[in-house]
Amino acid sequence: QITLKESGPTLVKPTQTLTLTCTFSGFSLSESGVGVGWFRQPPGKALEWLALIYWAGDKGYSPSLKRRLTITKDTSENQVVLTMTNMDPVDTATYYCAHRRCGGGSCYHTFDYWGQGTLVTVTS
Amino acid sequence: QSALTQPPSASGSPGQSVTISCTGTSSDVGGYNYISWYQQHPGKAPKLMIYEVSTRPSGVPDRFSGSKSGNTASLTVSGLQAEDEADYYCSSYAGSNNYYVFGTGTQVTVL
């Protein structure tokens, strides 16, 4: 059974750096094709994709946030970490991590298991 | 990177059908058959309902179906049930830079 859980601070101050950890089970980031993505959703607003890391270490970032984001993985600890620099109140959102769907020897451009999300509020 | 356009709301009575559109460009929706649809109930994480335009993961009722024509994808929910009342988001893969774009979201109400 695949599960993911986000952890990190619930409150950050403007200009600070946010570090979020996604701890997962039920799959390994050393398996070919596997990936973990990060997403966010401001209160009452739409989902937004932030970043993605693949089993081989390839990474992708939202073009609009690329200069502020870093995604890394710790395969032995089954964790993916997202850092976002220079936080602003507009970054207040629920942050989710999710598993890239794989099955039957194929992987897909979609995400089938999601964490419960963690609300991060940016305020002074 | 602009969000895909969805109608803000849609509604139908129990047993009826509702269709939600998702309009993008040739760089996303029109360029790839990697369209996903997610259902999200209030306070909950998104749930994958459709991927690759029209494929349902196991456990998703066949009342949910997807299609695509040009730069517009669609999700149809047939035989509406009370539990289908939720927000729905489309998403499209958008290229070799490994990025994804989401829709603006549609709130479905079962009357």
Image: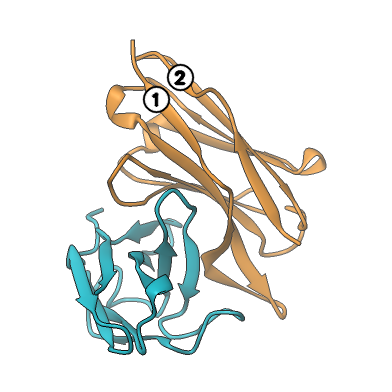
Q: Nearer the viewer, residue A48 or A30?
A: A48
Give x and y (percent) for residue B109.
Answer: 26, 69
Q: How is the image coloured?
A: by chain
Crowd tier of the residue under label 2, counting other residues whose Cα lies within 10 Å: few below 14, some 14–19, many 20 or above = some
Q: Which residue is mark 1?
A: A121
Residue A27: image quadrant is bottom right
Depicted A124 relative to depicted A6: above or below:
above
Label whose residue precedes the other's in the sequence (2 or 1): 2
Is the C-beta separation of discs 2 and 1 under 8 Å?
yes
Whether residue A56 is visible, yes or no, is no
Q: Which residue is mark 2?
A: A11
Give x and y (percent) for residue A61.
Answer: 44, 45
Of the residues shown, which amino acid type is indicated by label 2? Leu
Depicted A9 relative to depicted A78: above or below:
above
Give left or right: position of B50 versus A36: left
Q: Nearer the viewer, residue A7 or B16?
A: B16
- Same-chain status of marks 2 and 1: yes
Q: Can you tell which chain is drawn orange?
A: A
